[in-house]
Image (cartoon, helix red, strand yellow):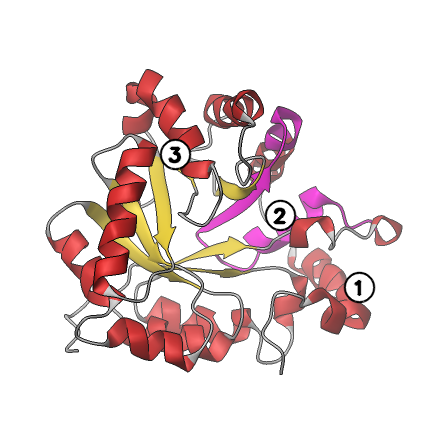
Amino acid sequence: MQMPSRKKPTPQSLFPGKLRVGLGGEGVLRTTGQHAAARAVIEAAFAEGIRYFDSAVAYAGSQGYYGEFWQEHQQQRNQSFLTSKSAARTYTGAMADLALSLDALNTDHLDLWQVHDIRTDHDLLEAEKPGGALRAFMEAKETGVVRYIGATGHADPGVLAHAVEYWPIDTVLMPVNPVEVMRDGFLETIMEPARNQGIRVIGMKTLGAGHFLLPESGITAEVLIRFALAQGVDQVIVGCSTPEEVRALVTAGRAGPLEADEADRVAAAFLPHAAAFAYYRSPA
């Protein structure tokens, strides 16, 4: 497939709001039947200044929870950056997922639609075929149904690097945590080519679903979020289960990046645990 040239978006045209932290699709959003709890988290996020909202077809009830909220708060929807993802690898499957997302989210467009969870070279080849998913993403952007398109991955930095280098994407969503400072990590592999291509970098797996908290080393959720912000990413997203967790996320976002020496200390504390903590990677 011949790829079109990438038009670099200006910073002002991508993520809205002043905060560089967003609400991830994990936590209470990746459940079913927890409508009141999910609503409380979404309401708290918007009230605290978060404007980036993450979801995916694969994330249980996340899209439906947002849809219920936007139905009653259309003004907030218009002020927000709403994202979703499709793990389909065919044109037909991706288009079906897009229709499902728009309906569930109760919106007529997505601000960002992402090719979800690219793990292998086979995923890349399937998406790039003439009848592959990438054509659907490009077409959706061309027609204005989505504003931007992106790719996500946490299994293999080399595989995701191909999408960054050759796909006409606007964003890349990848793990950003102290584990990824290691040689051949996502930070080393992806950041420079993404910047060269004008691609915005969004960090995920910042807390490792809580596994990365090391109280004995003073490594709290706030420290990990601020560590991620110190890596030069454009946005960091974290799933939350309560309004209190949302407020903690916002507090970390407002505190801003760690100083370089503190970030180095955090990375050093993770060195003995790096292999175990990279649970989300594909087996070597």
Secondary structure category for the residue under label 3: loop
Q: Which mark is residue 44?
A: none
* Amino acid carrying mark 1 in the image: Ala
Quarter occupied by residue 138:
bottom left
Q: Observer-nearest residue: 178 or 96?
A: 96
* Magenta extent: 218-247
Q: Position of residue 209 (x, y in %)?
A: 67, 50
* Amino acid carrying mark 3 in the image: Gly
Q: Residue furthest right?
A: 216
Q: Is residue 270 magenta?
A: no
Mark toward the start of the polypeptide (3 vs 2): 3
Q: Which residue is mark 3?
A: 17
Compared with residue 139, is residue 188 higher up or lower down, i.e. above or below?
A: below
Measure the C-alpha gap from mark 3 to mark 1.
Answer: 33 Å
Compared with residue 75, is residue 67 higher up or lower down, i.e. above or below?
A: below
Q: Which residue is mark 2?
A: 225
Residue drawn at x 35%, y 76% as measured from the top left: 124
Which quadrant does the N terminus fall into?
A: bottom left
Which quadrant does the C terminus fall into?
A: bottom right
Q: Is residue 8 visible?
A: no
Q: Residues within 10 Å of mark 1 (few under 14, many from 20)?
A: some
* Amino acid carrying mark 2 in the image: Ile
Residue drawn at x 51%, y 43% as measured from the top left: 24
Residue 271 appears left or right of 197: right
Q: Position of residue 90 (x, y in %)?
A: 26, 66
Q: Residues within 10 Å of mark 3 (few under 14, many from 20)?
A: some
CB within 8 Å, label 2 to label 1: no
Q: Which residue is mark 1?
A: 269
Q: Position of residue 86 (x, y in %)?
A: 35, 55
Quarter occupied by residue 244:
top right
Residue 103 appears left or right of 237: left
